[in-house]
Amino acid sequence: MSNDRSAISGVYSAQTAISDHPHHVLIGHVIIADRGTTRAHALVISQRRDGVHRLNFDAAWRDGVMLSFRNEDGTGCTHGHCRDAPVGMILLSAPLFHAAQAQGLTARLTGPSGAIDIFAPAALFNEAAARAVDMAPDDLV
């Protein structure tokens, strides 16, 4: 994907369930986006609508270290379909992204909705990385 007006180009992985919480289904996919010489990696998290309530988190943690997390709101509507509600994204440094390619990413989301553990499998990160190979020079990867 690319947008000439914003000069942003990017790729994304498939979506998969990243939480086994008994009452909420969280879905994740990985994006890689370039703008000029800057590359961003992120795990995008959404909530499958369950008809009960929307989850609200303000932080993500991994091994006791706070990750760069941005919460999101909105309808989650695309192409006329409103299926998932956005939760947020975990922005990943290049080293953390590369580690996630090898072992996946385990994290705990915390906030007003409590705490939910997530696991994004390595396959998501590898799929996004494979799609990004033709996107920009090798020094951004």
Image (cartoon, rainbow, N blue to C red):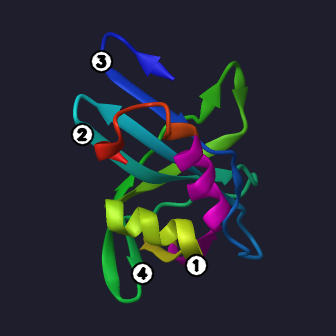
Position of 28 compared to 93: left or right?
A: right
Labelled pair 1, 4 in contact (Cβ < 8 Å): no
Find residue 6 and name its label: 3
Outermost left residue: 37
Magenta extent: 114-130
Q: Determine if the magenta segment contains residue 116.
A: yes
Q: Amino acid at mark 4?
A: Arg
Q: Which residue is mark 4?
A: 62
Find residue 132 and name its label: none
Q: Which residue is mark 1?
A: 117
Crowding at dot 4, Cα within 10 Å, few <14 / some 14-19 / many 20+, comes out as few
Comparing 12 with 50, the one in front is: 12
Q: Between disc 3 and disc 1, whose residue precedes?
A: 3
Q: Between disc 3 and disc 2, whose residue precedes?
A: 3
Find residue 38 and name its label: 2
**What is the distance, in whole Å, between disc 2 and disc 4 at their CAs?**
24 Å
